[in-house]
Image (cartoon, grey):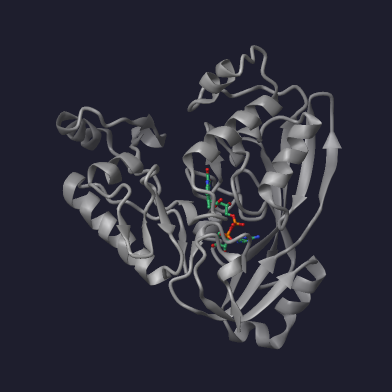
Amino acid sequence: MTNLLPYNTFGISAFASQFVEVSSVSQLQSLIKDKSFSEKPFLILGEGSNVLFTKDYEGLVLKNSLKGIEVTKEDENHIWVRAAGGEVWHNLVMHCVNKGWGGIENLSLIPGTVGAAPMQNIGAYGVEIKDTFEELEALNIQTSELEKFNNEQCKFGYRESIFKHDAKGKFFITSVTFKLNKKPILNTSYGDIETLLKEWNIVKPTIADVSKAVIAIRQSKLPDPTVLGNAGSFFKNPVIEILQFEKLQKDYPALKSFPAPDGKVKIPAAWLIEQAGWKGKRFGNIGVHEKQALVLVNYGGGTGKELIDLAYKIIDSVNGKFGVVLNPEVNII
Ligand SMILES: Cc1cc2nc3c(=O)[nH]c(=O)nc-3n(C[C@H](O)[C@H](O)[C@H](O)COP(=O)(O)OP(=O)(O)OC[C@H]3O[C@@H](n4cnc5c(N)ncnc54)[C@H](O)[C@@H]3O)c2cc1C
């Protein structure tokens, strides 16, 4: 039995009956081919920054520790960088920023591993990994063969990919390749990036400046999981029909919206949760963060059961007030 407390950013104590650190693809293949592998459930774990353990895990936890970053190809304008699935995402971002390769600097400081990034097409500050994603390699758990997925095959959407649907639980992502720009095109229009760069008197920002701005903004807004247990945004921003939005806006003129595919609109879950009165509320060892209503927190000693019960209460209350159903972004285990 292994306590998963050090392996999830919520800081939840939950025991796994078996725990193996995977540091090579051949080790993973041998594990999968072993007769006993199919006898129990398995869970792939990166940094545990997007999971909530609601009970002990009666199965095998495969902790991804595959390492390595390499350039696989380059031309005059682009560079293709492949990173192993167990690399820490922010380390990859810093590696690329330091080299001057642009495209993922807006995704600085997102916790987690490279291998988990395609799962929900991680995104922040107007950028998603799908914008620079070239391909990934994943081990098919059934066949123990490596397979490649290109951008289209991953079916990326807002916090979505094929790995949360048809391919769920069927693949272990071993590496991801990004196509980055040697002549970076900056995206500073989102959030407070531009304001901060101006405050810093930076007229011609570099990707390193953008990265620094993103880091500063994130540090000022989001709780650091090493200090306060959390998994970032607990809920996704709901995507609703335009008609429903227009009706809601009549009652709530302050409600904002952002364009979403198929003529729908995305509305901020944080605003809905705050209006429903949950922001900053504490219930014993758990609660809703005081600065960011989307983030549920564990003050220490809280359980996954307590957190999921709170999440359901928030879902019910937001649905009751606005007729909008929130969906968790965090993977509930
Ligand atoms: C403070 C904070 C801020 C955050 N901000 C953002 C943000 O701005 N944008 C954003 O998109 N996310 C954000 N997140 C969520 C999180 O950082 C991402 O979802 C990240 O990609 C999770 O990586 P991980 O390695 O921790 O995955 P884990 O939590 O370990 O796993 C997540 C899911 O992916 C599966 N998985 C993990 N690795 C693999 C693999 N190699 N192959 C197949 N399946 C795998 C797991 O089984 C699980 O279902 C934030 C989290 C925190 C704590």
Q: Residue at x 52, y 57 (%)?
A: 50
Q: Point out the residue furthest to the top here.
A: 203
Splitting the image into 4 quarters, where does residue 106 fall?
top right
Whole-percent x, y for residue 115 in the image: 66, 55
Q: Residue at x 38, y 71 (%)?
A: 305
Whole-percent x, y for residue 253 in the image: 21, 27
Whole-percent x, y for residue 125 in the image: 53, 33
**As drawn, 5 above or below 233:** below
The quarter of the image that holds ligand 1 is: bottom right
Residue 242 relative to residue 128: left or right: left
Q: Quadrant of the N terminus?
A: bottom right
Residue 46 relative to residue 268: left or right: right
Q: Residue at x 49, y 47 (%)?
A: 223
Q: Nearer the viewer, residue 34 or 203?
A: 203
Q: Nearer the viewer, residue 3 or 162?
A: 3
**As drawn, 20 above or below 313:** below
Q: Does residue 282 appear anywhere in the picture?
A: yes
Number of numbered callouts drawn: 0
Q: Does residue 141 appear anywhere in the picture?
A: no
Whole-percent x, y for residue 252 in the image: 19, 32
**As drawn, 135 above or below 14:** above
Residue 314 relative to residue 17: left or right: left
